[in-house]
Amino acid sequence: MLSSLYSMLLSEDGQGMAEYALILAFVALACAGAFGVLGPAVRDRVAAFAESSF
């Protein structure tokens, strides 16, 4: 029983998934920040384009 507990503690199966989850969270935060910063500029450009095309 002690050996199975020891092998479970040394297992690295979940490490890859945890790293991918952290990368995904970082990318999501970066996208949210970019949308927050660039959102007003994009909105103004789209509004100007919509007004000029009609």
Image (cartoon, helix red, strand yellow):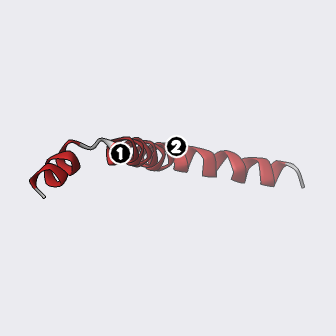
Instruction: Inspect the image, locate mark 2, and give the three-letter code of the amino acid beneath it.
Output: Leu
Q: Quadrant of the N terminus?
A: bottom left
Mark 1 surroundings: few (<14), some (14-19) or many (≥20) residues within 10 A:
few
Mark 2 Cα shell of 10 Å, populated few (<14), some (14-19), many (≥20): few
Q: Which sits in the foreground, 13 or 49?
A: 13
Check whether the beta carbons of the residues at disc 2 and disc 1 lie within 8 A of each other: no
Residue type marked 1? Asp
Using the image, tell me which numbered label, if any, was put on residue 29: none
- Of the image marks 2 and 1, the number of the one nearer the N terminus: 1
Q: Is residue 47 left or right of residue 14?
A: right
Please, is residue 19 above or below residue 4 in the view? above
On residue 13, the disc is 1
- Number of the front mark, 2 or 1: 1
Q: Residue at x 14, y 47 (%)?
A: 6
Tell me the residue at 45%/50% (across/down). Answer: 32
Percent x, y of residue 31: 48, 45
Determine whether, in the image, residue 18 is placed left or right of residue 48. Answer: left
Q: Residue at x 45, y 42 (%)?
A: 27
Q: Position of residue 40 (x, y in %)?
A: 53, 50
Q: Residue furthest bottom?
A: 1
Number of the label disc, if any, that sits on residue 38: 2
Please, is residue 1 above or below residue 13 in the view? below
Q: Residue at x 38, y 43 (%)?
A: 26
Q: Secondary structure at mark 1?
A: helix
The extreme left residue here reads 2
Q: Of 11 and 37, which appears nearest the observer? A: 11
Q: Position of residue 36 (x, y in %)?
A: 45, 50
Q: 54 or 31, which lies in front?
A: 31
Residue 38 or residue 14, whichever sits in front:
14
Q: Secondary structure at mark 2?
A: helix
Residue 39 at x, y percent in the picture: 53, 49
- The quadrant of the rendering that contains the C terminus is bottom right
